[in-house]
Amino acid sequence: MKNLVLWRSARISTLANKGWGLIDNGALLTLGEHIEWVGPVNEMPVELRERVATEHDLGRTLITPGLVDCHSHLVYAGNRASELELRLRGISYEAIAQAGGGIRSTVAATRAATEQDLYDVAEQRARRLMAEGVTTLEIKSGYGLSLEAEARCLRVARRLGRDLPLSVQTTFLGAHTLPPDFDGRVDAYIDAVCEWMPQLHAQGLVDAVDAFCDHIGFSPEHTRRVFDAARALDLPIKLHAEQLSNQHGAAMAASLGALSCDHLEHLSEADIPLMRRCGTVAVLLPGAYYFLRETRMPPVTALRAAGVPMAVSTDHNPGSSPSLSLLLMASMACTLFRLTPLEAVQGITLNAARALGLHDRGQLVRGQRADFVAWNLEHPNELAYWFGHHAVMRTIQGGRERP
Ligand code: NIG
Ligand code: FE
């Protein structure tokens, strides 16, 4: 039976076996949404060649796995450009938040928006990321902070995954900040988040659960209650950890089997072996570091030495990282955090997929999803080299070329 699609004439960076995995004059065979074979074209087994139904010439482009953005807050209304001016005048992110700006101001705008308005702005943002080769995107809630508004934001995220040629993973971030209607009642709010969670999950809206553990977010004890509720539902957990202060949230999350801990500027080196043992991915967010003009780097050298997988993401949000370029983040991961170009590229593909608990993507090997990007580049290290513009030629999502 002829059922394979041949993608030929490419230089392929498979990212297999911990390196670039370069194959010159390579080809891929796909069957439906998956990769059936990949290798040098002259090594293609005859019996597979005979099953080819359709052929595509990739025109000697460079092929890499589709990009994975594993941490975004894509669904919100309004923007916070005025806070940039305040911060440049010396008012801190924390002070703005404590004065009722920050996350709470985006919550007010998001609650006031209709579901269709939220969809329209989020769709535009998703398309910007897709234009850069993103094939899998995580989207968090966290700007609704009521059962109804969180559900609305998660429905928007789900709908994006249905309507666009894009895999969307949803994350419930009810524990993002204390909403004004719960002022002075943190315990009651955490109870509410734990009650909403099974309801949202029952509607098929939740793939994972996140929290913001920090002095302007929630304590490790409150975060722990949210995680216990998630674990009771068998939902994977992840954490905004040690962004502005060290709460040892990363160690707590890792000990509960967290998929990832994200930000980590204030992570203490003593907590790193636990992350390694528990298989927790360190998600680095250089956009937030840059935009908040932070000076304390995440402990990259120690994470590397311990063998903790590192991912890199946009953290797209209106307050700390209003960027829609994952490739710019790869560049910044190198220049600001000193990742190697290979680490940065693994960070926006393979390790980003692991940070989402996805093992079916991130590398171009047999059995993986046929999500790949054709670039007008010679070598994949250029993905972390050029910045502010990109070189995507074609994107193949689940074995089908995006229009
Ligand atoms: O990942 N740190 C918490 N959450 C977001 C920022 C949210 C906001 O400022 O609106 C982050 O940086
Ligand atoms: Fe975030």
Image (cartoon, rainbow, N blue to C red):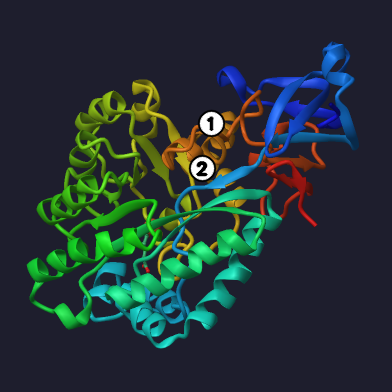
Residue 50: image location, x then y, percent: 89, 20
- Tell which residue pokes out farthest to the front in this image: 1
Q: Quadrant of residue 190?
A: bottom left
Q: Is residue 313 visible?
A: yes
Q: Residue at x 55, y 70 (%)?
A: 122
In the picture, the quarter occupied by the N terminus is top right
Indicate the secondary structure of the residue bearing disc 1: helix
Q: Amino acid at mark 1?
A: Glu
Relative depth, front residue between 350 and 327 = 350
- Mark 2 or 1, closer to the camera: 1
Q: Which residue is mark 2?
A: 333
Relative depth, front residue between 46 and 333 = 46
Question: Relative to residue 399, is residue 211 depicted above or below?
Answer: below
Q: Tell me if label 2 and label 1 are in contact, CB under 8 Å.
A: yes
Residue 90: image location, x then y, percent: 33, 72
Q: Amino acid at mark 2?
A: Ala
Q: Which residue is mark 1?
A: 343
Question: Relative to residue 274, is residue 110 depicted above or below?
Answer: below
Q: Is residue 175 visible?
A: no
Is residue 46 toward the left or the right of residue 361 in the image?
right
Residue 221: image location, x then y, percent: 10, 52
As measured in the structure, the alpha-carbon distance from the residue carrying label 2 to the one carrying label 1 is 9 Å
Q: Residue at x 38, y 65 (%)?
A: 141
